[in-house]
Image (spheres, rainbow, N blue to C red):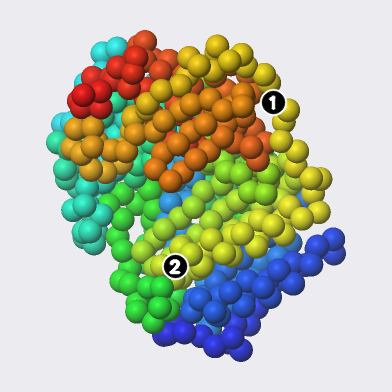
Amino acid sequence: MKLAGLMLAGLFACASSTVHAGNDWRALHEKLVAIQSSQAVPSMGLVILDRGRPVFVAATGHGTTTETPYRWGSITKTVTALTMLQLLAARGVSLTDTVAGHLPGMVSESLPAPLPTAVFDNPWEAEQPLRLVHLLELTAGLPDLTASEFNDNTRLTLQEALARNANQRRLLWPPGLQHSYSNVPPGIAAAVIERISGLRYEQAVEQLVLAPLKMRGAGFEPTDDLPGGFRADGLTEIPYWNMTFRAFGGLNASLDAMARLLEALLDGGRLAGRQVLDSVAVRRLFRAESSLGARAGLQVTYGAGLYGWVSGGHLFYGHGGDADGYRSRLGLLPGAGRGYLLVINSDNPGALRRLQKHVEAALTADLPQAEAPEPVPVSAQALSLLTGTYYPSSTRFQISRWRSGDRPTAEISIHQGQLIFVRGNRRQSLVPMGRDRFRRPDDPAVSVVFTHFEDRLYLQGELGNFVRVRPDGCPGFILGCDS
């Protein structure tokens, strides 16, 4: 049944919930429902985990229950990554395998349509090949989808999606240099999953993740009981959008089903104490290894399927999602055994941020006060070696403008023993945590690092990716940043 228009507050009835005695999750839910009503959000879903188990699951909105499917957008990337990690563990395949070593000749009875000759173009392939780990950690060096791909609602097979605009799927910098968000690597990962498993991507996800977790009804096909996605007014419905690659954003699943995924993520692949997923595969989702920044000690970054962010001084891991009329957020506090899942069927990112802020505050309210680690002094001479003008070393869109040097630079200077990062109106002090490692004042872990590659100095982390313009010059893949 489709939702039609704004639901009045009286219709926001909790369809299903349980409550843990130690926390008043109902009171939190009442706050969220008030925000839902004020923001004209037709439907909202909430899952809370405490002590590693779902303790509150609720759907609010006319006609929705905890068994109603929602669209989860880019949280699908976590499921795709988990599918590949499960598959590699079962087949004894390493994440360091090259992508090219798995994709040629992708034809079998279950996969009748061959892949295009060139799925990607890596100018550095001989010395720095694209590897499976780069696809999961989004360190492949690939730009995002083109505008034509984002705006086309045609339902495509994986082979058709990979064939379209294949000539524009050229790496912009060497793989493994830096993390840069893109929706393309999951599509290539899906092709690798199909090649290794002999199954279609959707079948592999079902067998390796959805079925072991007993996520009933979860899948990649539209169903009649989806509540529909709406624009921010809560009135204008957005058509069901067919993702170019279902592997980056096409998952549909209920709150009940997703609660099982969250429990397994928090408990190393266990459900109710029973091991149902490979524990090494699950834990690998949280960890980054392939970028220069990760190898230099960056702790707040994108792992193999989950990324970190800081809220109230606490380090969360999870993922966000945008599915054309649906917005979602998954957040985990592994050390505390807590987590949450939020979803709304309104293209209203501001509303989701407000909801997320309240949920994260409630999840951390009774936890020990997070204390930022003590600074590790760095000499003034060492700090001075990091100062200068920096240009963005990565981009998702507007590639020609970026390559021509037409992007705002950043300045790094020293003030009272700390580095100061300034770009436009943004000013950020950086607390030293040892040579070349820093954090923002409220961060509980290293969130900015400086690292070298081919005699050039890079900054990576929560401030973005940058390369110093002088005195080290600019890498060859950026044409105009040092002119």
Q: Residue at x 56, y 47 (%)?
A: 318
- Single out the mark in the foreground, 2 or 1: 1
Q: Residue at x 54, y 79 (%)?
A: 38
**Residue 387 in sight:** yes
Q: Position of residue 221 (x, y in %)?
A: 37, 62
Residue at the extreme right of the image, as rendered: 21
To which residue does mark 2 refer? Answer: 348
For the residue pair 264 and 339, the one nearer the viewer reads as: 339
Q: Position of residue 428 (x, y in %)?
A: 53, 38
Q: Position of residue 189 (x, y in %)?
A: 36, 37
To which residue does mark 1 refer? Answer: 375
Question: Disc 2 or 1, which lies upstream in sequence?
Answer: 2
Q: Is residue 369 above or below residue 298?
A: below
Q: Residue at x 53, y 56 (%)?
A: 329
Q: Is residue 40 above or below residue 438?
A: below
> Which amino acid type is marked by label 2?
Asn
Q: Specify whether 44 is left or right of 172.
A: right
Q: Which picture quadrant has residue 150?
A: bottom left
Q: Secondary structure at mark 1?
A: loop
